[in-house]
Image (spheres, rainbow, N blue to C red):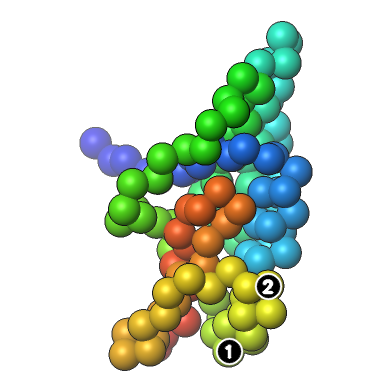
Amino acid sequence: MKFQMVHENYNVMDLAKSLQFYEEALGLKEARRKEAADGSYIIVYLRDGITDFELELTWLKDRSEKYDLGDEEFHLAFRVDDYEAAYQKHKEMGCIVYENPAMGIYFITDPDGYWLEIVPTRD
């Protein structure tokens, strides 16, 4: 029996804002979407164009209160080929929330407060 990771889901408050952030910060592009016939939800799947893994963003029409993300112990990690350029871009965007120079990593947050780890490509 073999399992393959397919996607991770994040619920978002402002779908347009989240889509813009993920494209600008990480180059993720919409691959497909599902919209409820009654307009109660929209699900958008984002891809990096390199792997088959997808980030699923779910917007719920009736949701008005912010999502409780707990202590931020969970996160999605992204490996980048130009770490310094990525760091500068994220610094300019003002989305870096935690840096660990000793480990050579940092974290950014999306508009809903989800933590995203940025790691360099290592030999």
29 above or below 56? below
Q: In this view, does 67 lie to the left or right of 28?
A: left
Asked if residue 41 can be seen in this view, the reply is: no
Q: Position of residue 72 (x, y in %)?
A: 35, 55
Residue depicted at 69% across the width and 79% down the height: 92
With 77 as the anchor, is 74 left or right in this view? left
Q: Name the residue under label 2.
A: 93
| Residue extending furthest toward the left | 1
Q: Which residue is drawn at 66% across and 66% down?
A: 25
Outermost residue, top direction? 38
Q: Which mark is residue 84?
A: 1
Q: In which quarter of the image is the N terminus?
A: top left
Query: What quarter of the picture does the C terminus occupy?
Result: bottom left
- Above or below, 123 relative to 93: below
Instruction: Identify the mark nearer the N-term, 1 or 2.
Output: 1
Identify which amino acid the numbered label 2 is placed on: Met
- Residue at (47% x, 38% y) in the render: 67
Distance, label 1 to label 2, CA atoms, is 14 Å
Residue in front for this viewpoint, 115 or 63: 63
The three-letter amino acid code for the residue at tag 1 is Glu
Q: Does residue 119 appear to the left or right of 22 in the view shown?
A: left
Residue, far front: 65
- Residue for point 58% across, 33% down: 58
